[in-house]
Image (cartoon, rainbow, N blue to C red):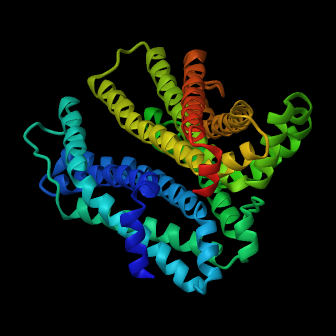
Amino acid sequence: MTALAFRSLRRRAGAFTASLLALFLGATILMAFASMLDTASGTDGTAHETLVTMASVVGGWGLLLVVFAVTSTLTLSVRQRSAEMALLKSVGATPAQLTRMITVEAAGLAVVAALLAIGPAVLVGRGLLALLHDTGQVPGDVAHAFGPIAVSMGVGITFVSAAGAALLTSRRLARGRIADTLAGTDAGRLTRKRIGFAALFFAVAMGEAVVTVTVMRDAGGDAMATSGQADIFAALGLALLAPALVRRAASVLAGPLRRFGGAAGDLAVTGMLRRTNAMAAVVTPVILFTGIAVGTLYLQATENAATAATGVAKTAEQKNIETLNFVVIGMVVLFTAIMLVNTLVAATAHRRREFGQTRLAGATPRQVMGTVAVETAVLTVLGLACGSVASLFTIVPFSLVRVDSPMPEGDAWTYVAVVALAAALTGTTVAAATRRVLRTPAIEAVAA
């Protein structure tokens, strides 16, 4: 099975593109921030503290986000191969053999992605250090170092997260019945582990919020250290519950969509109820993108307003911290946006056979596009709503501390812009990917 895994990687390179991109971007970010620890080894005093803080605090929650994104993408990739695994089982492959094949594939892909990411990670790491030089937080004579800490963390974490995600998902699929796997249905039931991790993330988010309004009440802008991470943990918790949320939304909207949406609405509801986990994979990056972007932008806007209210001009240090916040968060939001597009393209491309079967059953390409449009609208609204709720875990506590109000400072157009960007990315990506899939003749799509 190990030999089969490597042959699969060589001959089906296109099928692994989404997973490779996720691993590559994740490894790049991990090594870039970890290189700050390599750089810090040759410094002392304030410069050392700044570099370690950059690597541990920002890199720490960035690590959590990257691991989750990589795990989510690989889980989607493994689930898309359920029919292949069922066929291998039907000819005698054991669950243990299938699990080993998928895990070896993921591990090999992780090693390749991590090695490819070394060059870009060096460039990103230098850019981060240059930013610290420009903002005066690290002396200009401190040179960037990219050494064993960056490489070991990047390769090690990428390898472990990829292999772990593949192992857990493949074991669950390999143990399923062949008939159920070939049917391609998933009820979206949440496992106890998934619920447990979701509860843990929510507990951490709530803990961060409580610490912000109690311990950090008189800490001024330093309260960003606790409140700034709360929306990330809340978004991760909601993302883990996405399958149940999708199923609930489809059940609630089934009547109106079937009544007013015609054939497209009926097909959309049926698809969301039969393929809940696959649909949840589309919602997850929307939740993360919205929650992090909205929470962070209003966090900084509130801090700016609180500083202005004192009547004292911003110090150079405050301006530098603001610049650093925007740049670093911009990197994370960009990563989330790329993962959103990557996941949508992978999920839509995998539906080639499904779309072909639907067209052979009598549906026109226009009706298929309509079905996908309805699905995308429901899933986007659900993701935006969950992401907005997640952002409140950061916005409300920090606003209470800094401006004595649960309402944040900042323009309402900031929220509108984030929502519009998330909706545009989702809608445009799915529409383009669907059109590309529909170019394949229905008979060829079913035979593929």
Horizontal side, residue 50 vs residue 239: left or right: left
The quarter in which the N terminus is drawn is bottom left
Q: Residue furthest top?
A: 311
Between residue 70 and residue 358, name the one nearer to us.
358
Depicted 311 relative to depicted 372: above or below: above
Q: Is residue 9 visible?
A: yes
Q: Quadrant of the C terminus?
A: bottom right
Residue 344 picture location, percent across and down = 56, 43
**185 left or right, relative to 349:** right
Q: Which residue is at 57% across, 30% downward?
A: 422
Q: Where is residue 319? Give x, y as percent.
A: 32, 24
Q: Nearer the viewer, residue 97 or 211?
A: 97
User: 14 or 91, which is in the foreground?
Assistant: 91
Image spot of residue 146 (x, y percent): 17, 55
Q: Residue drawn at (75%, 64%), measured in percent from left and top?
A: 183
Furthest residue toward left = 141
Instruction: Identify the residue shown where x is 36% and y is 49%.
Output: 25
Q: Position of residue 43 (x, y in %)?
A: 13, 52
> Taking the image as drawn, is residue 211 in sight?
no
**Above or below for 378 versus 87:** above
How many badges with numbers are in the image? 0
In the figure, residue 129 lies in which quadrant?
A: top left
Q: Residue 128, located in which quarter of the rendered image?
A: top left
